[in-house]
Image (spheres, helix red, strand yellow):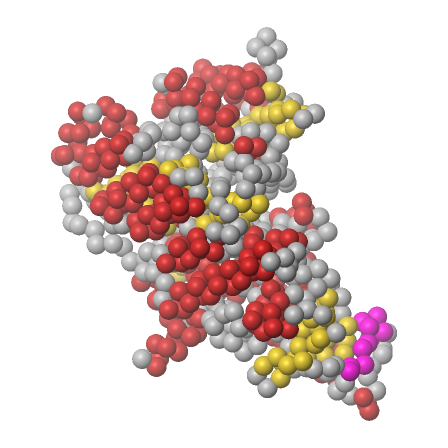
């Protein structure tokens, strides 16, 4: 993984010193909360319902054992002993104090971590495929380009006060695990005539007005990436709306101008900035690439007798392997997913002890590395098949062996009204109850991939627009109600979910979602996924199931 | 009103006495008189089209760009365009909600004059010196870390 050199280290250290001084000025009353707010947000510090919340960046989801231990330390010392993984491969602490924030950042800087640009109207933490460098079929390791973007976007003088937040995701795989079509900019690395470059997708996003992004360039030579990003950001910074924060994202600009006109403006801007030296010096790309060289994989046989024996002997292990383990590109290795969606707990939550357990397992069995996923889970990217049984037993001991990756109980949910000042309704209790029901059904493995995503308000932090089943919390005269949406996907077959009808109470919603899944089970053909059944059958039949008065 | 002006490698307090020309007047043909050449400043709103300034840009001593609210970052792009695209060599003045916490972004985008009102000068000096390295090349001539690394490698 990437390691800071003297420049990176100096910049992060200077940022902590700058923020400490800004906090001191705020505490002394020298600056107003209005002036301070963008400063703290640009350092990931939110004021939530009950307390401050600190969002720490895990750039493109890559985290070392040493860093995991430090995250555990922060949870223990400055929080209530736990932390929360987000849908953007970040980690959040819900109970730090403003006074402690600089000390937390000092602790993080020591292990090459920071909270820079995890919020605010700037370029946010760049996200990527959690299987990068481990899965077969990648054109190139996307993390190299993520790190380049991370550096380029850090304290960018022109683009730190954009109309609104700005999210970039990169994938290098046909199987899009980075949701590139629902980001402000999505980059898909591809190869054309022996050259590597990017498909550039702009204007996707969720929130109040969801859009699937449009491709504005089929192929951008990879060494021109930064100048092209500059051109897009400049067009957005100049022409994006600033009069209404709900219409300020780039997706609104792209759609107001039309994709053709937007593309024309970007291409014109790009052509005009040619020769200014905005692109990365080739030697720098090569330097950064060396950090992402494959670890020292052993020469192993594809099959492992120890693994096969454990599979045969231990049904629980076998079940976990079926749901949570995916093939690695190197013979004898696997990618092991750690679900952070155990039944009865808040999605994405981990304790300090669990973080340390993951650190130990990653250190011993996965070249010192874990990954955060955009679905609030973790994965161990490089585990020997020979070691999988031992890894699983360690995960069981830490309460981290839930076997439900991508299944119905692997639910994404935002913090909701339990924590968030913006929410209309609670998300976590709904997620917990649905997970409990589907898990208890004993059927979820037979259904296969079924993505349920729950947001507590229209800001859509729980990505309900791209859930196979989405649930959206709404406020009805001060009471919590929920809309059910169907048919969304954030993967390569991206689509937006459709609202099925009027909102229901929490109890009605739980029953309706359960009926929807039972209906799918009755109607599915040839083992098709929920999403495929839905697309085949159409919304009408599902609506009847949801609003069947005999049931409600 | 305190005005910090970049001069001789640092920001110093300096009175400015430009003849200010509103953009509407400029668009209607108003130009600095030949005798006052070099002391005129064009005042632009932050959504002004820089192309409309036309070829007489070089006759201006300064362009004044606006921060109606410090959270509105459009003037950063205008400054950058004035330097990079239009080759403007005069002063670029930041006017409006000019706070120390954005000062470094301004300077790195090409601003050379900050109208800081009654705000604390020392705070601006501290803020301008907060970082010793940057990941982007600045309009102020600062090199990006990417280039610094290349230079360090070449020297090694």
The quarter of the picture where the C terminus of chain A appears is: top right
In percent of width and height, residue A249 lies at: 63, 49
Q: Residue at x 70, y 64 (%)?
A: B97
Instruction: Please tell me in which quadrant of the rendered image residue A327 appears.
Output: top left
Q: Nearer the viewer, residue A189 or B43?
A: B43
User: Which is more toward the observer, A312 or A371?
Assistant: A371
> Residue shown at 78%/81% (left/top)?
B18
Q: Total number of numbered labels?
A: 0
Looking at the rendering, the stretch of residues picked out in magenta corresponds to B17-27
Q: Position of residue B135 (x, y in %)?
A: 48, 67
Residue A123 position by quadrant? bottom right
Closer to the camera, A266 or B22?
Answer: B22
At 50% from the left and 33% from the top, the residue drawn is A413
- Left or right: residue A435 versus residue A264 is left
Q: Classify A35 as above or below B16.
A: above
Q: Is residue A229 visible?
A: no
Whether residue A284 can be seen here? yes
Q: Residue furthest left?
A: A305
């Amino acid at each position: 993984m990437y390691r800071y050199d003297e420049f990176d280290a100096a910049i992060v250290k200077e940022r902590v010193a700058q923020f400490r001084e800004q906090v001191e000025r705020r505490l002394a009353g020298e600056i107003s909360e209005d002036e301070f707010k963008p400063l703290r947000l640009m350092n990931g510090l939110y004021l939530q319902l009950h307390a401050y919340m600190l969002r720490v960046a895990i750039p493109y989801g890559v985290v070392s054992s040493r860093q995991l231990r430090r995250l555990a330390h922060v949870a223990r010392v400055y929080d209530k002993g736990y932390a929360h993984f987000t849908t953007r491969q970040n980690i959040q602490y819900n109970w730090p104090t403003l006074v402690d924030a600089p000390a937390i950042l000092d602790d993080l800087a020591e292990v090459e971590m920071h909270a820079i640009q995890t919020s605010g109207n700037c370029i946010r933490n760049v996200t990527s495929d959690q299987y990068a460098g481990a899965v077969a079929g990648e054109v190139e390791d996307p993390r190299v380009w993520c790190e380049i973007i991370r550096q380029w976007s850090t304290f960018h003088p022109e683009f730190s006060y954009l109309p609104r937040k700005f999210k970039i995701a990169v994938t290098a795989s046909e199987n899009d695990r980075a949701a590139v079509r629902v980001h402000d900019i999505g980059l898909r690395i591809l190869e054309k005539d022996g050259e590597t470059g990017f498909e550039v997708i702009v204007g996707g996003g969720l929130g109040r007005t969801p859009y699937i992004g449009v491709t504005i360039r089929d192929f951008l030579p990879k060494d021109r990436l930064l100048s092209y990003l500059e051109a897009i950001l400049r067009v957005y910074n100049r022409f994006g709306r600033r009069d209404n924060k709900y219409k300020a994202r780039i997706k609104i600009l792209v759609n107001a101008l039309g994709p053709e006109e937007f593309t024309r403006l970007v291409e014109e801007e790009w052509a005009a900035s040619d020769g200014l030296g905005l692109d990365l010096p080739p030697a720098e790309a090569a330097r950064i690439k060396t950090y992402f060289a494959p670890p020292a994989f052993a020469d192993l046989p594809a099959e492992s007798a120890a693994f096969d024996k454990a599979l045969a002997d231990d049904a629980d292990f076998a079940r976990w392997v079926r749901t949570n383990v995916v093939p690695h590109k190197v013979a004898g290795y696997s990618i092991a997913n750690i679900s952070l969606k155990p039944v009865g707990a808040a999605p994405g939550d981990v304790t300090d002890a669990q973080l340390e357990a993951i650190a130990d397992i990653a250190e011993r069995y996965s070249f010192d590395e874990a990954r955060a996923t955009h679905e609030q889970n973790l994965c161990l990217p490089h585990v020997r098949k020979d070691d999988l049984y031992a890894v699983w037993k360690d995960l069981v001991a830490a309460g981290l062996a839930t076997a439900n990756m991508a299944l119905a109980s692997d639910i994404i949910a935002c913090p909701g009204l339990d924590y968030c000042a913006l929410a209309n309704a609670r998300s976590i209790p709904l997620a917990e109850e649905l997970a409990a029901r589907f898990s208890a059904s004993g059927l979820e493995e037979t259904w296969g991939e079924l993505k349920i995503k729950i947001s507590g308000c229209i800001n859509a932090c729980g990505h309900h627009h791209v859930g196979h089943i989405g649930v959206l919390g709404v406020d009805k005269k001060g009471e919590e109600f929920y809309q059910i949406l169907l048919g969304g996907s954030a993967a390569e077959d991206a689509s937006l979910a459709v609202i099925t009808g009027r909102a229901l109470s929490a109890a009605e919603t739980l029953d309706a979602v359960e009926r929807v899944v039972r209906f799918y089970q009755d109607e599915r053909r040839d083992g098709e996924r929920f999403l495929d059944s839905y697309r085949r059958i159409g919304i009408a039949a599902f609506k009847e199931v949801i609003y069947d008065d005999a049931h409600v | 009103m305190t005005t910090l002006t970049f001069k001789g490698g640092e920001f110093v307090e300096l009175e400015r006495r430009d003849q200010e020309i509103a953009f509407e007047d400029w668009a209607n043909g108003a130009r600095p008189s030949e005798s006052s050449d070099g002391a005129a400043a064009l005042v632009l709103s932050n959504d002004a089209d820089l192309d409309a300034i036309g070829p007489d840009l070089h006759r201006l001593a300064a362009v004044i760009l606006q921060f109606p609210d410090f959270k509105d970052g459009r003037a950063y792009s205008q400054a950058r365009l004035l330097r990079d695209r239009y080759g403007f060599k005069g002063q670029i003045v930041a006017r409006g909600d000019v706070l120390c916490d954005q000062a470094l972004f301004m300077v790195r985008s090409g601003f050379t004059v900050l109208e800081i009102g009654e705000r604390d000068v020392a705070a601006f000096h501290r803020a301008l010196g907060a970082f010793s390295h940057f990941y982007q090349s600045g309009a102020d001539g600062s090199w990006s870390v990417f280039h610094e690394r290349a230079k360090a490698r070449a020297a090694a």
